Image: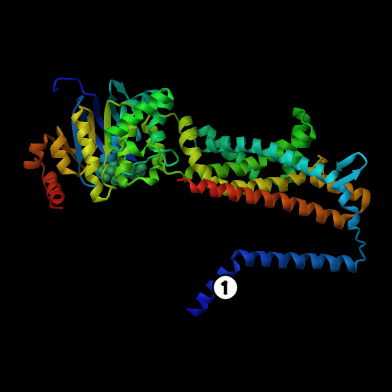
Amino acid sequence: MSDSKPIIELRHVDKSFGPFQALTDINFSVRPGERVVVCGPSGSGKSTMIRCINQLETHDAGSITVDGIELGDDTSDIRAVRQEVGMVFQQFNLFPHLTVLENLTIGPIRVRKMGKAAAEALARNYLERVHIPEQADKYPSQLSGGQQQRVAIARSLCMEPRIMLFDEPTSALDPEMIGEVLEVMVELANTGMTMVCVTHEMGFARRVADTMVFMEGGRIVEVAPPEEFFTNPKSNRARMFLDQILEH
Amino acid sequence: MAGVALRKRVMRGLSSRPASIAIYLFVMWGLIELALTGAEAMGYNWQWYRIPKYFLTSDADGITLGEIPWGLAGTITLSTLAFGLALAIGLLVALLRLSDLIVGRAVARGFLEIVRNMPLLVLLYVFYYVFGPIFGLDRYAASVLCLAVFHGALISEIFRGGINAVARGQWEAAKSIGMTTAQIYRYIILPQSIKFMLPPMTGEVVNMIKSSAIVSVIAVVELTTVGRNIISDTYLSFEIWFTIAAVYMAVTLVISSLASYLERRYTVRE
Ligand SMILES: Nc1ncnc2c1ncn2[C@@H]1O[C@H](COP(=O)(O)OP(=O)(O)O)[C@@H](O)[C@H]1O
Ligand SMILES: [Mg+2]
């Protein structure tokens, strides 16, 4: 695995919001099949970094290459990359005017130009994978938070992406629903999916991560395998962060 | 404290349905009473019996529609055409304003400023007396275009508001599955913004019907023009204007109740 070419590569990436520099000199790469967990204090630029990977935020400087495509101003390149990169958001962002099934099929039908029947078969298959096949005809507002997030994961998977990005997927959930979402994510990790997860669920990180990334103040401060990161973090900042997180 | 509570109770009582109907009837009665006493004071000779024939006449050949229904049909046709076009203009201007195109945004803003700061009557004259001869517009085309442009500007603000009211996360989710901007608008954003746009859009339909009366100044046949024509033949100005006003009110009330039905249907979902 270690000798294969990176599927995601960020080099010297900078990003500012007006006068505020949110990312500074980010260098970071992900190999196919690698599971990366990104953590760090709030406001450290974790969301901004992973949103740059599918260009929900555009970077100001440096280069980002995803699956062999360097991301620039070309919108069709960006759309091509987005079809290969699924994203799951903290707030689910399901389409409230569509049923669960329609949420799942709209991408395959409109973007992949798949037939309706094939798209529905695909969608039902993924609903099965996230353990809610019986909810297909409901509207998102009729589901619990945990179910909504699993629908959101299935919606991304229906595009059959090569990479999945997760931005704090369990932070908006009631505690009793976190487990069911993490379980689906662990199962996904076991299929060999390339994953970049921003999360503070350290139990999950220990179980699935190949690599831990710790960010602070818009920089990547530490990159380490989880056993090393959790037992013997190199930076003081990471140690303090872990102490705080693991107390709770 | 008690005073505030009392005032709240009174306000709530006044805004209840039976109370508002009662207030409405009372105010209307007052206005009509005022008009009648005024008319009496100036010795006006009421001739209501001459009005029905402008709605319907029946003779050996059967029932014939009078001028007022034809005028109403003219108003509705004109308003419908103009509103359809205004929707297209409004959507286009709103999309331009929300786009990344600097030129597009500037054009949209310029259009809005010009149209919003011009009286409708002047706009009509511009379309009829200036654009008419240049582009070969007849009075009807000039009227439709003028109304469409005027209301298109207002409708673009309704579209913009509705589009902006949809949560940002919807854009991000749709982008993240690779949809194009056009697809995102069509399948994700616009369907969700309908519920925000419906109430102000209904208001705009009503405004369109009312402002369509202005084309009577260039003698396009619609309800108000018909009213003017009848009066110039008969001098029945009080009866005819009361009647024409009542017809406009009936139409706009029907539209409002239709719209509140639609609104209820849209909010039941989700
Ligand atoms: N759209 C934006 N406009 C302005 N500032 C932003 C925007 N998005 C993020 N930021 C700022 O950038 C910093 C990093 O944000 P973010 O990437 O969301 O951090 P994290 O996900 O680690 O909590 C924060 O200080 C935040 O306020
Ligand atoms: Mg974040």
Q: How many marks?
A: 1
Q: Nearer the viewer, residue B163 or B240?
A: B240
| SS at badge 1 | helix
Question: Who is closer to the viewer here, A134 or B234?
Answer: A134
The residue under the point 86% across, 56% down is B239
Residue that label 1 marks: B10
Lateral position of residue A191 relative to residue A149, left or right: left
Q: Could you tell whether A209 is left or right of B52 in the image?
A: left
| Left or right for A139, reference A14 | right
The residue furthest bottom is B2
Q: Is residue A72 above or below residue B39?
A: above
**Height in image: B194 above or below B103?**
below
Q: Toward which corner of the image does residue B47 lie, by quadrant?
A: bottom right
Q: Is any part of residue A20 visible from this angle?
A: no
Q: Position of residue B109 (x, y in %)?
A: 57, 40
Q: Residue furthest left?
A: A232
Chain of the residue where label 1 is placed in the rendered structure: B
